[in-house]
Image: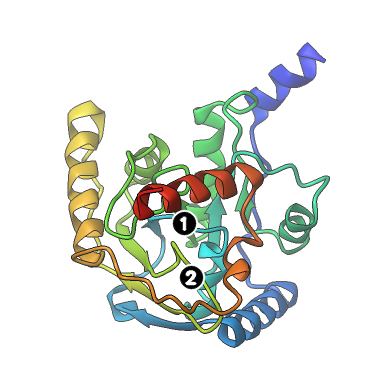
Amino acid sequence: MRDEEERARRVGPRVPAVMVTPRYRLMLALNRWAVRVLFSVRAEGLERWPAPPFQLVCNHHSGWDPMLILAVTPATPRITWFGPREADFSRGFKNRVMAFFGGVIPFNPAKTTLVSAVRAVRSVFDARGVLAIFAEGRVGFAERELLPFEEGAIAFATASGVPIVPCAVVGSSELWFRRRVAIRFGEPIESAGMRGGVGRAQLEDRVREALTGLLPAAEPVLPRRRPLAWIGEVLDGAEDRERHARARGERSGG
């Protein structure tokens, strides 16, 4: 078992699929249909996308976030997602669906080195694809706030010198039937030449500032009537549901 774990850390994730296949187009069509039936989603700033390859650095409120983003973005260039760290594609309905359609680089720090993860990410950029990563590494529940970034959000872009496009999902911290959600894209930020600790720290500050600028100025006031509010948590794990419940209690003073 120890030899297998060491090999997993050395080899890392499998090279992800980056071609736009019929299977991928089917997934996009089904996803777009489901999301647009359940929610009211719009994109802002798609014209700011540079020529691929580039990296989307996104905030994270819900298990729906990848589906919301895919529902308003074009099929090409294909988006490959980094994470989630808990993904085990051999079990669980959501994980089996991700394994069937591909386009995900799972990462578990206990089994995979950052070097091997960078190798898998670089294959996406070499194929002129797009990598999307939730910079905070975990779900947050405040529309206006960003959690601390994890290392990969900046390291992957600087290792390959690709531009970073900030992507803010606004409205997914609390979802219900026909909830309005905006997917906002900022101006590309160059990462070339920003290697080393100082360069990466400066780049992270720029990305955080740009991403914060796409978020609302204040926390939204939620309506009392939120039909089918349970929809918002069907793709969340048990831990995130518990954290979300605590966050709601803190906001209400309970």
| Displayed quadrant of residue 166 | bottom left
Residue 28: assigned label = none
Query: Which mark's residue is nearer the viewer, 2 or 1?
Result: 2
Q: CA distance from mark 2 to mark 1?
A: 10 Å
Work out whether residue 66 or residue 18 is closer to the camera in this orientation and state it: 66
Q: Position of residue 65 (x, y in %)?
A: 51, 63
Identify the residue at horizontal 24%, vertical 36% (top origin): 200
Q: Please tell me whether residue 63 is drawn above or below residue 111 in the rendered image.
A: below
Identify the residue at horizontal 24%, vertical 42% (top origin): 204
Identify the residue at horizontal 50%, vertical 77% (top origin): 226
Q: Position of residue 129 (x, y in %)?
A: 50, 62
Q: Position of residue 49 (x, y in %)?
A: 33, 72
Is residue 236 visible to us here?
Answer: yes
Q: Please tell me whether residue 238 is drawn above or below residue 234 in the rendered image.
A: above
Is 143 positioned to the left or the right of 94 in the image?
Answer: left
* Mark 2 neighbour density, 10 Å: few (under 14) some (14–19) many (20 or more): many
Identify the residue at horizontal 44%, vertical 53% (top origin): 248
Q: Position of residue 116 (x, y in %)?
A: 56, 32
Is residue 83 visible to us here?
Answer: no
Earlier sequence position, callout 2 versus callout 1: 2
Q: Which element is circle 1 on?
A: strand
Q: Which element is circle 2 on?
A: helix
Image label count:
2
Identify residue for label 1: 132
| Displayed quadrant of residue 57 | bottom left
Residue 69: assigned label = 2
Q: Amino acid at mark 1?
A: Ala
Q: Are marks 2 and 1 in contact (CB under 8 Å)?
A: yes
